[in-house]
Image (tube, rainbow, N blue to C red):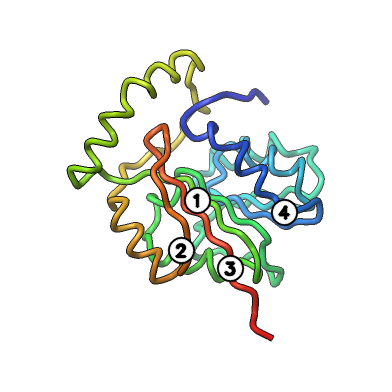
Amino acid sequence: MSEYWNHNTAFHPELVAAVPGPGARVLDIGCGDGLLLQRLSARAGSVVGIDPDEAAVVSARSRLAKTPGAEVLHGDFLRTEFGESPFDLITCVAALHHMPLAPALERMEELLTPGGKLHIVGLSENKTIADHLAAAAMSVPVMVVSRIRRQSAYPGMVIAEPKESIDEIRTTASAILPGHRLRRRFHFRYSLTWTKPLVSA
């Protein structure tokens, strides 16, 4: 299956680089057609993707049909059981705003192994003056890059408008993922990274 570039795939290299080692178990939430999952599989021991969109899951399974250690699940992330083994890395690109914020973050925290890493690339709603100014400053550069890179996506990609501002996301994350790092990024995105603390001896 073909590769493509857009405001989400622009972050794939740093997500792939976050795979902690060749034996890592990785979960990609909202895996879509499986492009990120395919890239993660090149560095991980096993990868699991989940998406609620049946058509996307069919595409992802086709893309990963010959990839050892890859599994694609059709279902609701908040309700799906993933077995007893926790994950060393969880990625979530442009999917968190499709779910209730706090329950989704709590579930991600629960599924990570101690010392495991969470990497979220998300969208936020512009609610404050700072939000609107940041978006305005980004508009022309993003448009130029998008045209140069010929932005595209897989057919039928499900989209939704974000409901929380970046400040609201930061406040919620602070209560659930203390010590996380959240920052505005190019392409009208933010990134949230967090390492689950090791269990005390």
Hey, what amino acid is under mark 1?
Ile
Hey, what amino acid is under mark 4?
Pro
User: Which mark lies nearer to you, 3 or 1?
Assistant: 3
Q: Secondary structure at mark 3?
A: loop
Hey, what amino acid is under mark 3?
Lys
Ranked by sequence position, the earlier of labels 4 and 2 is 4
- Label ID, residue 196: 3
Ranked by sequence position, the earlier of labels 3 and 2 is 2
Identify the residue under disc 4: 20
Hey, what amino acid is under mark 2?
Leu
Q: Secondary structure at mark 1?
A: strand
Ranked by sequence position, the earlier of labels 4 and 3 is 4
Height in image: 11 above or below 168? above
Q: CA distance from mark 3 to mark 2?
A: 12 Å
Ranked by sequence position, the earlier of labels 1 and 2 is 2
x then y, percent, for residue 10: 53, 31
From this viewpoint, which residue is outermost toward the top?
148
Location of the C terminus (image quadrant): bottom right
Height in image: 14 above or below 109? above
- Label ID, residue 120: 1
Q: CA distance from mark 3 to mark 1?
A: 14 Å
> Do the residues under discs 3 and 2 have CB atoms within 8 angstroms?
no
Q: Secondary structure at mark 2?
A: helix
Identify the residue under disc 2: 105
What residue is rendered at 44% in x and 20% in y? 146
From this viewpoint, which residue is outermost toward the bottom?
201
What residue is rendered at 54% in x and 48% in y? 51
Q: CA distance from mark 1 to mark 2?
A: 10 Å
What residue is rendered at 23% in x and 36% in y? 133
User: Which mark lies nearer to you, 1 or 4?
Assistant: 4
Q: CA distance from mark 1 to mark 4?
A: 16 Å
Q: In the visual, does 32 lie left or right of 159?
A: right
